[in-house]
Image (tube, grey):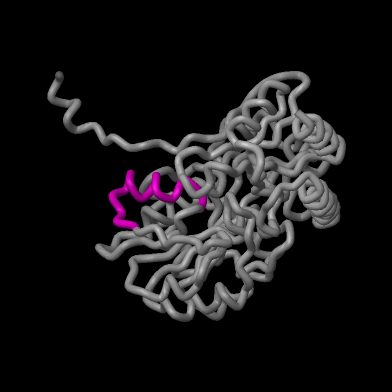
């Protein structure tokens, strides 16, 4: 074996959800928005001239940052944008979690967290959810080198009240506390209002879910200017031009179209609540999700067998086999009403067998 093989960094990679390509598929496995983005997005993309593409984009993404800041009542210096929230969170891991003390995050959560920690050699500890799959704030009141958790949590969809989040922040004044709000627009209260109250809080959001721009890859962090400057310093030492011109224009248009944003999130919330009733009628059990997905289990049906049966019919949901606590659960993204009707039609037939 060549000697250089001894120096290759080896990690257990994150496994993304399948991206199947069937004309008749119902894709409910990666929490994408079932509706297209704002029509203003296409206009914004088309406004980029061919001539402009020979020039580098603004490395600070100031136009987009300004629009995000205005949307949340912040200053532009309190916003950092990146290529999806994955990029933003990875940059935060690289920038802030450099202690010998362990980074804390839930044992059932976004599977990318341990991947980043392992890749960047960050010590970490998993904090178990309780038997109801809830984050227990008091469990984070111990020595740590940082804290991160999604709210609502993924893949469970459980929402932590803002008072509980504030207690975690307040009890960890010497640690960065990151709240990953990828799904907050589907029914929860954001922690953004706490940013000006607590210097150690970072809130991360994304355009991939509620703004239907997963294909454009836009994520952003909001915090105090000192934290944002530290993020930019690391970014500029790594890759200055992360956001291309069309993405900046598309994101700016999307964040400004509040009416459209409210319209599609309201549709998804309404479909989610109807889906809860349908799943309950069929005997499924699940957390009271405040996200754009449901995390369901059935006492009489094996999750893997159901996952495979759905897949045969080109109905794609997400199955997690690595964690024994959730191997009997499926995560089902909320689709359109028509897509969900077809899912439930299949499930009713399946349950009769």
In this orientation, which residue lies closer to the viewer: 83 or 155?
A: 155
- Residue 229 lies, with reference to residue 257, above or below; the image says below
- The quarter of the displayed image where residue 122 is located: bottom left
In this orientation, which residue lies closer to the viewer: 77 or 274?
A: 274
Where residue 127 appears, as percent x and y from the top left, is 42, 62
In this orientation, which residue lies closer to the viewer: 269 or 252?
A: 269
Q: Is residue 176 left or right of residue 187?
A: left
Q: Is residue 46 part of the magenta span, yes or no?
A: no
Residue 91 visible in the picture: yes
Residue 339 visible in the picture: no
Where residue 307 appears, as percent x and y from the top left, is 63, 31
Q: Is residue 286 left or right of residue 82?
A: right
Quarter of the figure that contains the N terminus? top left
The residue depicted at 57 percent of the width and 75 percent of the height is 164
Q: Is residue 28 left or right of residue 18?
A: right
Q: Is residue 118 part of the magenta span, yes or no?
A: yes
In this orientation, which residue lies closer to the viewer: 57 or 297?
A: 297
Quarter of the figure that contains the C terminus? top right
Where residue 242 appears, as percent x and y from the top left, is 51, 42
The residue sitting at the left extreme is 3
Residue range corresponding to the magenta coloring: 109-124
The residue depicted at 45 percent of the width and 61 percent of the height is 128
- The quarter of the displayed image where residue 196 is located: bottom right
- Residue 192 lies, with reference to residue 231, above or below; the image says below
Q: How many marks?
A: 0
Where residue 9 appears, as percent x and y from the top left, is 26, 36
The residue depicted at 28 percent of the width and 63 percent of the height is 99
The residue depicted at 85 percent of the width and 37 percent of the height is 341
- The quarter of the displayed image where residue 309 is located: top right
- Residue 253 lies, with reference to residue 192, above or below; the image says above
């Amino acid at each position: 074996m060549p000697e250089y093989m001894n120096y290759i960094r080896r990690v257990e990679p994150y496994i993304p959800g399948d991206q199947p390509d069937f004309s008749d598929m119902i894709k409910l496995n990666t929490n994408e928005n079932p509706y297209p983005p704002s029509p203003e997005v296409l206009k914004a993309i088309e406004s980029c001239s061919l001539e402009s593409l020979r020039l580098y984009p603004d490395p600070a993404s100031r136009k987009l940052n300004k629009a995000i800041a205005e949307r949340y009542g912040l200053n532009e210096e309190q916003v950092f944008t990146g290529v999806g929230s994955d990029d933003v969170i990875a940059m935060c891991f690289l920038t802030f979690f450099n202690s010998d003390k362990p980074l804390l995050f839930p044992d059932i959560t976004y599977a990318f967290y341990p991947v980043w920690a392992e890749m960047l050699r960050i010590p970490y500890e998993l904090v178990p959810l309780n038997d109801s799959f809830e984050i227990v704030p008091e469990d984070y009141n111990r020595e740590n080198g940082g804290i991160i958790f999604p709210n609502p949590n993924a893949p469970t969809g459980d929402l932590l009240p803002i008072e509980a989040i504030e207690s975690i922040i307040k009890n960890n004044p010497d640690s960065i506390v990151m709240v990953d709000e990828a799904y907050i627009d589907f029914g929860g209260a954001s922690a953004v209002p706490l940013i000006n109250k607590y210097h150690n809080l970072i809130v991360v959001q994304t355009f991939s879910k509620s703004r239907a721009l997963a294909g454009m890859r836009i994520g952003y962090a909001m915090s105090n200017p000192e934290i944002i400057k530290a993020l930019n310093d690391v970014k500029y030492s790594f890759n200055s031009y992360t956001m291309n011109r069309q993405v900046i224009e598309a994101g700016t248009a999307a964040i400004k179209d509040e009416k459209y944003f409210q319209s599609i999130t309201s549709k998804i919330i309404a479909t989610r609540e109807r889906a809860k009733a349908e799943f309950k009628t069929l005997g499924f059990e699940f957390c009271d999700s405040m996200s754009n997905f449901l995390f369901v289990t059935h006492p009489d049906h094996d999750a893997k067998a159901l996952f495979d049966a759905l897949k045969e019919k080109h109905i794609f949901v997400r199955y997690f086999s690595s964690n024994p606590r959730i191997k009997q659960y499926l995560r089902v993204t909320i689709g359109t009403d028509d897509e969900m009707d077809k899912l439930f039609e299949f499930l009713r037939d399946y349950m009769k067998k």
